Amino acid sequence: MKTSIPKDNGLTIQKLPLMESFLTVQGEGLHTGSAAYFIRLGGCDVGCVWCDVKESWDASAHPQVSISDLVGIAENSGAKIVVITGGEPLMYNLEEFTAALQSAGLKTHIETSGAHPLTGNWDWLCFSPKKFMAPREKFYQAADELKVIIYNKSDFKWAEEHAAKCADQVNLFLQPEWSKRDQMTPMIVEYVKKNPKWRISLQTHKYMDIP
Ligand code: SF4
């Protein structure tokens, strides 16, 4: 019987480290307000200083769960959308996982920094590049939405540099980093008024006090 293979190496993964999973409402981006089942995989080596899920970083701290069990709990939730997040979920080859989710009739969404190889078949790809580890080029054209976290004023220029490399039809979002939201949100509002190709994404789940 195969056991887990923790890194993307082109081989089949039978198990993935599960930090948590829960039925909630997507709080961010274009699908804000839609019911979704979140699966948060453990493991991240990107190292964002403001990361709000640092407990996800160490993959070994989280139990290995089989893909069939993960698909089963997602199916039982009743949600139509499954959001795979982390951590950095693309530290793992997700081909088999997304194939199994789609076979079960579920829409596959992902939130990724783009710092690792793009694997899996995604109905929605949220690309959120981070300054702490360069993203891979493939994500610019694959992204359905580009979500840039605004932590300080210089991040607007950084956001434009990434947007310029994306496909024309990509949905562009600026989102205030949560701890800086009081300072950054008014700046984002002014920026979007002057640069209407961008939209604002807020972490509405935090305002609603839901996971
Ligand atoms: Fe945290 Fe996400 Fe950055 Fe990883 S990529 S450090 S999980 S914010």
Image (tube, rainbow, N blue to C red):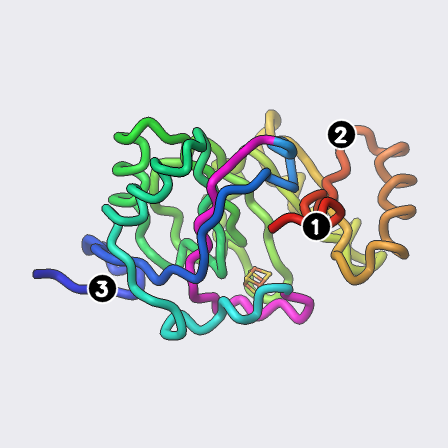
* Magenta stretch prevailing secondary structure: loop
Q: Is residue 171 left or right of residue 208?
A: left
Q: Is residue 206 left or right of residue 74?
A: right
Query: Of helix, strand and loop, which one carries label 2?
Result: loop
**Residue 68: numbered disc:** none
Query: Of helix, strand and loop, which one carries label 3?
Result: loop
Q: Residue at x 29, y 65 (%)?
A: 6
The magenta span reads 34-51
Q: Is residue 7 above or below residue 171?
A: below
Give, as a three-letter code, the residue at label 3: Ser
Q: Is mark 3 within 8 Å of ligand 1?
A: no
Q: Position of residue 14 (x, y in %)?
A: 21, 55
- Foreground pick, 117 / 184: 184
Give the labeled residue for mark 1: 209
Q: Quadrant for ligand 1? A: bottom right
Label 2 Cα crowd, 10 Å radius (few <14 / some 14-19 / many 20+): few
Q: Could you tell me how far apart the alpha carbons at marks 1 and 3 are, in whole angstroms?
A: 34 Å
Mark earlier in primary sequence (1, 2): 2
Image quadrant in which you'd find residue 52: bottom right
Q: Position of residue 207 (x, y in %)?
A: 76, 47
In front: label 2 or label 3 = 3
Give, as a three-letter code, the residue at label 1: Asp
Label 1 Cα crowd, 10 Å radius (few <14 / some 14-19 / many 20+): few
Residue 45 falls within the magenta-colored stretch:
yes
Give the labeled residue for mark 2: 197
Give the labeled residue for mark 3: 4
Label 3 Cα crowd, 10 Å radius (few <14 / some 14-19 / many 20+): some
Q: Is residue 88 above or below residue 145?
A: below
